[in-house]
Image: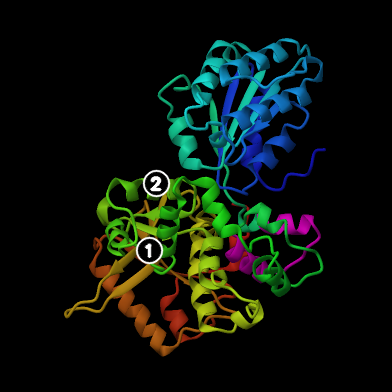
Amino acid sequence: MKHTIIGRIAEMKILEQLLKSDRPELLAIYGRRRVGKTYLIKNYYAGHLTFSCSGECGGNTRTQLANFQQQLNTWFPANRQLQPPANWQQAFIMLRECFDAVKTKGKKVIFFDELPWLDTHKSGFLSAFGYFWNIYLSDRPDILAVICGSAASWMIKKIVNNKGGLHNRITQRIRLLPFTLKETKDYLQHRNIRFSDYQVLQLYMVTGGIPHYLNAIKRGESLHQTINNTCFAPNGLLADEFQNLYAALFTNYEKHVHVIQALAKKNKGLTRNELLATGDLVTGGGLTAVLEELTESGFVEKTEPFDKKKKESLYRLADEFSLFYLRFMRGKNSKNDWLTISKTGKYIAWCGYAFENVCMKHIPQIKKALGISGISVAYCSWYRAGSKQADGAQIDLLLDRSDNTIHICEVKFNIKQFVIDKRYNQLLQQKITAFRESISPGKGLLLAFITTYGVADNEYKLQLVDNEIRMGSLFDGA
């Protein structure tokens, strides 16, 4: 049965174009676990799916081939296979024979889900699939093959950048990202759950807009009940998600968890050398590979500090749920309660960092609110260590425009309007002065505040604030 698809406008345009294509198509779709890849493909292509098969986590080659046989029998009962194929070469011969018997017109979609799990050690799956594509599927303009995987780094290395039989064979790729704030709100409203923008924002700071996580929310519950029931209840959907999440995606996942744990302790992020200095992590190329895998999968964001060299790139924890888990859920006990936690200083610190992450994922919306959608913008952070000569300073978000203008963005999460008092005014003045000293004199500076409920009017706001963006702008569909 086909279900409603929320959001995914750009992705659905691509999927429709592939359906209308007059040539064979090979689509690679990847994105982190639980982001909705399978849901999107199966529902959008519900009337065109002719065969689908999914890898089984931890299954050996024999198991994967047995599952393949069962799917063949489900989709092609007239060609019932009594024995599983002995290897993947034989499996694709069986599939070819089944497709040769299909006489319907129009595009026929073949869907291989969780491809990294199908490609078990020394199974020969990828080479056999590459041969199947080159010898058979590539001559069938009525075929659309979709290959999907949650291990984004594996998909890019083994599929998109394949050097063997699939080299340059991918005709389209989609990296499916989590919902935006607008898509999250639309999804909740579709299920008749009507939280305020402030509540949706808080929920996003916990779940990161992952559709599967949002699916656990029940109508009639408050935000407090929702977070307690999904995160802190013994049988809550997210109670064991952190351990399962990384184990399902990465080989030797303990290394990836070490990196995530280290980054969770530093809001400004860490350089590669700072990560090595923690003493808990792999060295050399091992760390480089782990960081690449975490970045490609969307758990970590790599940013270039303003006007710095690449070796000083900062890595930030970008996955909202991982941050939430490490701050509040790890080592949890029956006394944990979200209402109690939300009154602590630890909660306030988390809100600040989590809201910064949300803003960095909504740069198009911020650009639209500033009226600069048509201007190229690079976003980054800036940090100057303190010394005997000067105080340290840090700017969490800079928007470096191609028209020689830079927005210094102050990101503030607050239950009410943010007030710039005398002390904070002095801090801002010092920060702006320090940054001005580090850039070209030809650059223009503008101070923008991104807040939940705005900045209270007073003399300091009048003197300093050039642009003001409230959380409602982050819900725009830019």
160 to the left or right of 340: left
In the image, which disc is placed on residue 145? none
157 to the left or right of 232: left
| Residue 52 visible in the snapshot | yes
Q: Position of residue 428 (x, y in %)?
A: 37, 78
Corner quadrant of residue 415 = bottom right
**Label 2: which secondary element:** helix
Identity of the residue drawn at 51% across and 68% down: 326
Magenta stretch, overall SS:
helix
- Say what amino acid the circle numbered 2 marks: Glu
Q: Which residue is mark 2?
A: 292
Q: Which residue is mark 1?
A: 269
**Residue pushed farthest left?**
389
Identity of the residue drawn at 74% across and 19% down: 82
Q: Position of residue 79 (x, y in %)?
A: 77, 15
How has the structure been colored for display? rainbow
Corner quadrant of residue 73 = top right
Identity of the residue drawn at 54% across and 74% down: 413
Is 406 magenta? The answer is no
Identity of the residue drawn at 53% across and 14% down: 134
- Say what amino acid the circle numbered 1 marks: Gly
Q: Earlier in the sequence, mark 1 or mark 2?
A: 1
Closer to the camera in the image, 141 or 84: 84
Taking 177 as reference, is 468 above or below it?
below
In this picture, which residue range is highlighted in magenta? 183-208
Of the residues tagged 1 and 2, which is closer to the observer? 2
